[in-house]
Image (cartoon, helix red, strand yellow):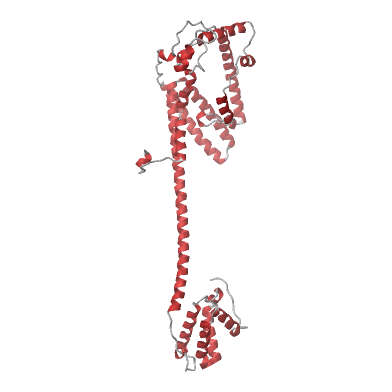
Amino acid sequence: MDKMRGGQVVPSLSHEECMTVMLGVLSDPALHIHASKGFKKVGDAVDLHGKEDLLICREAGVLWNEPTTDGYPNMRAKIDAELQDLKEEFDSGGITFCERDVKRLIDPYPKHDKVDRVLENLGEDFYHDSVHRLENSAELSAVATEDADAQAGQDDSTSDGADSNDEREDFSTIAAASDHLPAVAASEVTVPREDIVPVRAYASEQVGRLMDTIHALQGNVEGLRAVGCVRAVQCLEFELTKARRRLRAITQENESVLNNFNSLRRAENLRRLEQDQAIAERKEKWRDAQRAIAAEKEATKQLQVKRQKLQELESVTACKHAIKNFTLEELGKGTNNAGGVKGRKNRWEVLDRIARLKAGLSAGQRNDWQWFKEAWDKAMVTEHGADWPEQFATWMQQVLTDPRSNAFSIFVYNETCRVFKGAAALQVPGG
């Protein structure tokens, strides 16, 4: 719907968006709790003494209430008989309440080739994700761990004693034999629905205070970890663990508080996930913008280089087609000073035009071109006198008719070596 509002006629989700949607669905604890009720509905995890027989429904309920192959009227009667045998063996001392005897009573799971093949292919690919809400107690400090272990030891000793007494009562209690029941599904029996426990005010207040405490501790832990206060971080993490334990104890006492707390936690996780996704999208857009800017700069640079080359080609082409005639009188013939300033300018123009033809000059020659042009023309006027304009025209015509592409560059090199040989000059690098 969001994509259609954004203008997509046929919206489609990317792989990342599909995974995000499934993460939001699977992060709902109510979904997993509802799925776990299936163990009750098929009779796999019901109470041994018949308190939850009515939860078995559909095909499993029919099988549960049908006569068994070994002569019992239904599964309840068979279980009661097995419990009676277990009690007699326990009273006689044949078994004791220990791990070895309990495991001895567990029959091996029957083989199913199709299912076993799937489990073998899965192998050990098992992990805990955020849905399990596991607490990592390995990061507690040594002192905090000792205190937690001592407290846990007291709690475990108390709980172990209570569990042991409860188990002995279960072993020593005989379930009353049930009557012969018809083979009907338990789903057809009306089960009274328990009233929903209202949210208690003090429990909600405690949950709110504990959540505020947890958020405050988490914020301080991040700040202390950033500055390297390891000891303080360990102490705060220990306090954070204790607050989470108290929060779990409160939520387990009241189902409504648990549901409300889980809803708030899911909303917070989804909100955090949306924020992370939005930040990732903004970062990706920023990277795209930077790449676009870099590409534009590179394209602009290449365009400038191509424009410069095009201008040079246009200049060469224009020089080839823009033919200008220079008479000997314009070059300075017939005068004692080789035409003076006007003749010198015309000779310089001829040199500039020829320098742009074909391969032209080398990089070093272009760098010293202005000096060479002025100094060479001045030296030739001194050497040839009034005959210099005619001699200049002869040399330039030879350069123009020379088939070599670098004829003028060779001419400038030879004249530089001939005329300025031994001349002192300061060579300075840089533009």
Q: Residue at x 46, y 52 (%)?
A: 290
The x, y position of residue 43, in whole percent, is 50, 16
Q: Residue at x 54, y 30 (%)?
A: 128
Q: Is residue 163 visible?
A: yes
| Of 77 and 132, the residue lying toward us | 77
Instruction: Say if 167 sits above or below 353 in the image.
Output: above
Q: Residue at x 59, y 32 (%)?
A: 139
| Of 99 and 138, the residue lying toward us | 99
The x, y position of residue 10, in whole percent, is 37, 41
Number of labels in the image equals 0
Q: Is residue 104 left or right of residue 193?
A: right
Q: Residue at x 61, y 23 (%)?
A: 150
Q: Is residue 191 visible?
A: no
| Of 311 and 364, the residue lying toward us | 311
Instruction: Say if 424 sits above or below 194 in the image.
Output: below
The x, y position of residue 173, in whole percent, is 55, 7
| Quadrant location of the N terminus in the rendered image | top left
